Amino acid sequence: MNESYTAVAGFAQTWGLIYFVVIFAIVVAYVLWPKNRKQFDDAAQIPFRED
């Protein structure tokens, strides 16, 4: 039983790290994509608006 837990834990740690790094890279690419700049610039100015 202990060997199977160790194997599953090792698998989850390795592939979980890869999964989260890939998701992080996708989010960063989305945020830095030139087409999305105006949307994020508008969102950054929301606290300064006096509507």
Image (cartoon, rainbow, N blue to C red):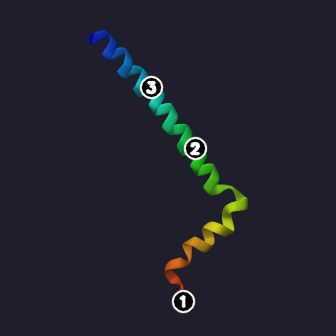
Q: Earlier in the sequence, mark 3 or mark 1?
A: 3
Label 1 sits on what residue type? Asp
Image-based side of 37 in relation to 21, left or right: right
Residues at marks 3 and 1 touching, judged by CB atoms closer than 8 Å: no
* Circle 1 residue: 51
Q: Nearer the viewer, mark 1 or mark 2?
A: 1
Determine whether the residue tagged by mark 1 lies in a helix, strand or loop. loop
Image-based side of 51 in relation to 29, left or right: left
The CA distance from mark 1 to mark 2 is 35 Å
Give the answer, above or below, for where 45 lies relative to 28: below
Q: Position of residue 26 (x, y in %)?
A: 60, 45
**Nearest the eye: 5 or 41:** 5
Residues at marks 1 and 2 touching, judged by CB atoms closer than 8 Å: no
* Circle 3 residue: 14
Q: Earlier in the sequence, mark 3 or mark 2?
A: 3
Sort mark 2 into few (<14), some (14-19) or many (20+) by Cα contacts within 10 Å: few
Residue found at x 54% / y 89%: 51
